[in-house]
Amino acid sequence: YTVAAEAGHPPSMYRLGTIYSGSLGLPEDPAKCRLWFERAAEAGMEQAYPEIAGIYLYGYGTDPDPGRAYGWYRRSAEAGDPLSMFKVGYMCSEGVGTERDMDEAVRMFRMAAVAGVPEAQFKMAMLARDGVIVGGSKLALAWYRSAADQGFAPAMFNLATMLYEGDGTEKDPKGAFDLYSKVAETGDGDALFMVGRMYFEGIGVEKDPGKGFEFFG
């Protein structure tokens, strides 16, 4: 791989970056990881764009450089990588590595959400509920469902809460209980509390105060 990479072969450069990241069980070398991912990216290998972007965002093997990270995430997003679209949206919304631009952030979040990124779908739901975009609770419900169907726990919890409260839809206590239960399996304290509460009060499930106390505990 080294011989091929030094001869100018981008896939070998990318493979060396992966090897030096330590993810293949070989010794980790952050500096060489950054070096080879950057060379692969500069050679036009699109798979390397988000790798080097993350390296500069978090400062792996180098000092953090949000501006350079943003530039690489932007190139990756323009090349069609949905997760990079989400990262660009985040950086635009928070003003990290670029000027704060909520219009561009929403555009990127929407593109990533449509492409199926659950984090972006969750973000679109929050933007709808907060009134940043048009659609309100009904749109939020739809995006939460999309993210929850992929097993994204924060979306499952928020969807459960909307079903529990009847926010944007008819109340569905059983549906809420099922979702809270799935999130509770991850050890989430808020979900454990809600499952306990629903057992204790008999909401969406047969009343069982004993089980309720177990979950409260």
Image (spheres, helix red, strand yellow):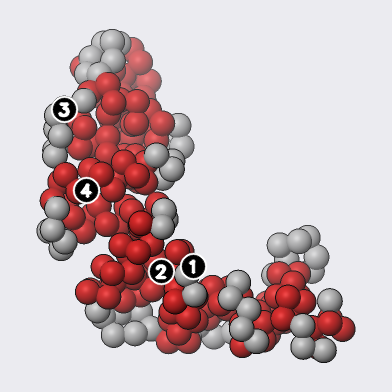
What is the secondary structure assignment of the residue under circle 2?
Answer: helix
- Give the residue drawn at x 33%, y 53%: 121
Q: Give the crowd class for mark 4: few <14, some 14-19, many >=20 residues within 10 Å.
A: many
Q: Amino acid at mark 3?
A: Lys
Which one is closest to the eye, mark 3 or mark 1? 1
Q: Quadrant of residue 134?
A: bottom left
Q: What residue did someone put label 4 on?
A: 140
Q: CA distance from mark 4 to mark 3?
A: 15 Å
Above or below, 129 against 22 in this view is above
Marks 1 and 2 close (CB-CB < 8 Å): yes
Q: What residue did someone put label 3 on?
A: 171
Above or below, 15 against 31 in this view is above
Q: Earlier in the sequence, mark 3 or mark 1?
A: 1
- Give the residue drawn at x 37%, y 46%: 147
Q: What residue did someone put label 2 on?
A: 85
What is the secondary structure assignment of the residue under circle 3?
Answer: loop
